[in-house]
């Protein structure tokens, strides 16, 4: 159930913080800011396109003969949004005042994204491979890693511009623009692309005469959006100015190297707090128990025969739930112990793994030759809703705890650091889970003369095929991994529950920089 996790890698704490302070200048009124809000929405939507495509590529590759180790290699493309804090101070400090503090980074970065997409489109069909040629995984990984690095840099610039583009009383709308825009972009790059790329979907819903291909390919989709990036970036560069933005005089000039160094020193000071170190250990290890279900189950369902576009479309009816859920859960996270909800949801989320494994095991017999029935999709939807409910309970609770403990003196930096650790705590177990599948799977070659061939390496697999055989899976590593993750998760909970309760009982001074010097 890994359909939505890539996404929204960091909350925009600085925006929320400014949104709170804007109440001093009057209630929100978007009159006069309509165009600015539209610009922000569009910029955040553009940002979501590479994220969505990076989520769609593993689905495209799953039945093209690649290994889960190669899927793990590709999963590194999701890391830039989780570690953008490492170069955010540089983006914030270095700029060309005459052109604009944020446009200095936004314009060239978006041009690079557009140019990169156009260049990638010319070779993408070859990189994805064919029946005779394996996909070029290293090239695909490097290409999308660079694309997401640029998108993460664009995110830093847009976040900063949002604070000054909008009037002070409307700055709270920036976080809404981010959420709605990035979700829309991810939807376009992931759900819409997989649907339009699928011959099955296009023939069933969009055509009267069936064809062997979808309406778009990854190459044509990249080419289209590459030109969209270039054209719209040119319009923004020419027509949208920062001169009239609400920029403080002291912030309108580039900062020196000393200021950049001070920003990193501030991060180091926060990390040195004992409470933060303990919380970081919790965040970095907590999701190990979920990685099999989060990272692998969706790919296993595709491998078992579920059309990838059907999995992608499951995200559509969940959008209203994802918007309403934080509002409903807010009353459970406003007290002195917001992580209590997190602890209650933890064992329930661990159960998603065995449930997903059971569904994967039954899928081949349930699908048959006719594809998924409505009853099967309904069961899949129920499991997905259960997973998302647990995920959002934990997400809302941990965000409330971050807001509660962050030192107000460095609120934005503090929360961003905690989010970075939390996101890394999602990425590394997922990458590990994908890598481990091949190493936990036991196969044998069915060629009579090669009874000792276990297809453990690519060489053995090639030898098996050369002798007219194929590799039969005797033990699927996914099921072993699910058991390991569930056991590890419940063992972790024995330590994690005590540690989290202790962290929630700490006084506010334990989280503040000034009290720990």
Image: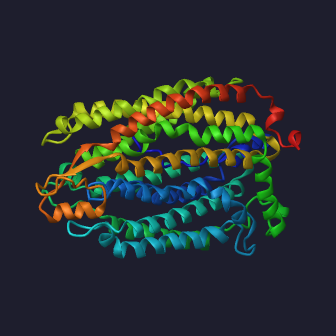
Instruction: Locate residue 344: give its quadrant.
Output: top right
Q: Is residue 153 visible?
A: yes
Question: Is 381 located above or below residue 60 in the figure?
Answer: above
Instruction: Locate residue 262: give its quadrant.
Output: bottom right
Judge from the rendering whether residue 114 lies leftward or rightward of residue 397; answer left or right. Answer: left
Q: Position of residue 150 (x, y in %)?
A: 55, 66
Question: Is 6 located above or below residue 101 in the figure?
Answer: above
Along the viewing direction, whichever of 88 and 203 lies nearer the viewer: 88
Q: Position of residue 304 (x, y in %)?
A: 24, 44
Along the viewing direction, whichever of 246 and 218 lies nearer the viewer: 218
Instruction: Locate residue 510: give its quadrant.
Output: top right
Which quadrant would the N terminus be assigned to in this image? top left
Which residue corresponds to the image point at 33% horizontal and 35% vertical from the top-left? 357
Q: Position of residue 34 (x, y in %)?
A: 60, 53
Total numbered badges shown on the rendered structure: 0
Along the viewing direction, whichever of 301 and 43 lies nearer the viewer: 301
Judge from the rendering whether residue 238 lies leftward or rightward of residue 256; answer left or right. Answer: left
Which residue corresponds to the image point at 53% horizontal and 39% vertical from the top-left? 287
Which residue corresponds to the image point at 19% horizontal and 34% vertical from the top-left? 366
Q: Position of residue 470 (x, y in %)?
A: 17, 56
Which quadrant would the C terminus be assigned to in this image? top right
């Amino acid at each position: 159930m890994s359909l939505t996790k890539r996404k929204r890698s960091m909350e925009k704490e600085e925006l929320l913080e400014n949104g709170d302070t804007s109440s001093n200048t009057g209630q929100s009124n978007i009159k006069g800011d309509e165009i600015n809000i539209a610009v922000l929405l569009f910029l955040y939507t553009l940002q979501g396109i590479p994220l969505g495509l990076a989520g769609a590529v593993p689905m495209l590759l799953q039945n093209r003969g690649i290994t889960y180790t190669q899927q793990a290699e590709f999963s590194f493309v999701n890391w830039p949004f989780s570690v953008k804090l490492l170069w955010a101070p540089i983006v914030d400090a270095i700029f060309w005042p005459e052109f604009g503090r944020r446009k200095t980074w936004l314009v060239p970065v978006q041009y690079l994204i557009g140019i990169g997409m156009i260049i990638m489109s010319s070779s993408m069909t070859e990189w994805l491979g064919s029946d005779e040629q394996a996909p070029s995984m290293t090239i695909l990984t490097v290409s999308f890693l660079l694309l997401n690095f640029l998108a993460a840099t664009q995110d830093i610039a847009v976040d900063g511009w949002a604070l000054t583009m909008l009037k002070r009383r409307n700055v709270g709308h920036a976080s809404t623009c981010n959420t709605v825009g990035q979700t829309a972009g991810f939807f376009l790059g992931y759900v819409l692309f997989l649907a339009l790329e699928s011959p099955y979907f296009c023939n069933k819903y969009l055509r009267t005469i069936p064809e062997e291909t979808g309406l778009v390919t990854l190459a044509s989709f990249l080419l289209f959006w590459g030109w969209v990036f270039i054209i719209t970036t040119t319009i923004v560069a020419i027509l949208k100015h920062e001169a009239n933005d609400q920029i403080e005089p002291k912030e309108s000039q580039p900062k020196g190297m000393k200021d950049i160094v001070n920003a990193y020193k501030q991060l180091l000071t926060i990390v040195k707090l004992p409470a933060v170190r303990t919380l970081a250990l919790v965040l970095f290890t907590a999701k190990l128990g979920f990685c099999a279900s989060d990272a692998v189950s969706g790919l296993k369902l595709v491998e078992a025969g579920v059309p990838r576009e059907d999995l992608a479309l499951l995200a559509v009816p969940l959008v209203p739930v994802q918007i309403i859920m934080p509002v409903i859960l807010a009353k459970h996270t406003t007290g002195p112990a917001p992580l209590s909800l997190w602890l209650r949801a933890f064992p329930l989320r661990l159960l998603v793994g065995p449930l997903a494994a059971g569904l994967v095991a039954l899928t081949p017999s349930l699908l048959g030759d006719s594809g998924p029935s409505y009853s099967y999709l309904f069961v899949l939807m129920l499991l997905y809703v259960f997973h998302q409910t647990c995920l959002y309970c934990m997400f809302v609770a941990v965000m409330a705890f971050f807001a509660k403990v962050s030192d107000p003196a460095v609120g934005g930096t503090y929360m961003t650091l905690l989010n970075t650790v939390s996101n890394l705590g999602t990425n590394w177990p997922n990458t590990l889970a994908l890598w481990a599948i091949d190493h936990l799977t036991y196969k044998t070659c069915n060629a009579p003369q090669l009874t000792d061939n276990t297809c453990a390496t690519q060489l053995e697999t090639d030898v098996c095929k050369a002798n007219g055989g194929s590799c039969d899976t005797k033990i699927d590593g996914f099921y072993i991994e699910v058991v390991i993750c569930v056991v590890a998760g419940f063992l972790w909970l024995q330590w994690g529950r005590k540690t989290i309760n202790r962290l929630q009982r700490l006084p506010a001074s334990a989280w503040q920089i000034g009290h720990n010097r």
